[in-house]
Image (cartoon, rainbow, N blue to C red):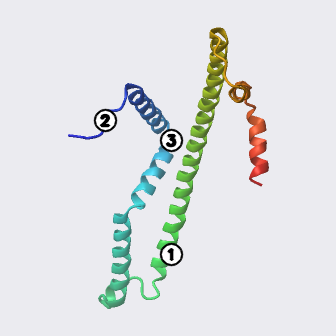
Amino acid sequence: MSTRPAASSAAARNVEEIARLEQGESAALALTERISIGITSAVGTFACAVVHVALLAGWCAWNSVGPERLRFDPYPFGLLTMFVSMEGVVLAILVLITQNRMTAQTDRRDHLELQVNLLAEQEMTMVLRMLGRISDHLGVAPDDRERAEARELMEHTNVYELMEELRRKFQ
């Protein structure tokens, strides 16, 4: 039996929603993107590296010590060099296609995360304001430091000012 606690229903719903988002993105991929992802996924494995090393070693061995009349690419293996170079160019293009797709996906996720964070900030500001009114109504007075911090937190957060401040700090 597993010793991990079961995920809460809220967490389970979140996992399901994320899975649906991922499936939707995968289903929306163009055929060329699917092919590119499939090739780069297959090529980016240890098994593929072993196959490449074996093929290259076999090519070199065959064309160095194989029957002389059957050697098709004598040393310095010009044909092999051309094939490997072409493969490198094609794989580099496919990797760039995959990276471009992943960058676009990351950008969409970042925008979603920013939107959710802004909504959460707005909700928390509203909650703080409501709590302030409730504590005023009940006559529960916070100390001066708490009151000042609460007032500051209840202010609208200007994301443009925050971004500008971050830019200044990290330059």
Q: Give the residue type that dot 2 points to.
A: Pro
Label pair 1/3, CB-CB below 8 angstroms: no
The CA distance from mark 2 to mark 1 is 56 Å
**171 or 66: nearer the viewer:** 171
| Image location (x, y in percent) of residue 171 | 77, 55
Residue at point 62% right, 10% down? 138
The CA distance from mark 3 to mark 2 is 39 Å
Q: Which mark is residue 5?
A: 2
SS category of the residue bearing label 3: loop
Q: Which is closer to the viewer, label 2 or label 1?
A: 2
Is residue 134 something one can see in this rendering? yes
Q: Is residue 75 above or below residue 89?
A: below
Q: Is residue 62 above or below residue 131?
A: below
Q: Which residue is mark 1?
A: 82
Q: Which numbered disc flags the more N-terminal residue, 1 or 3?
A: 3
**64 or 44: nearer the viewer:** 44
Q: Residues within 10 Å of mark 3 (few under 14, many from 20)?
A: few
Q: Residues within 10 Å of mark 2 (few under 14, many from 20)?
A: few
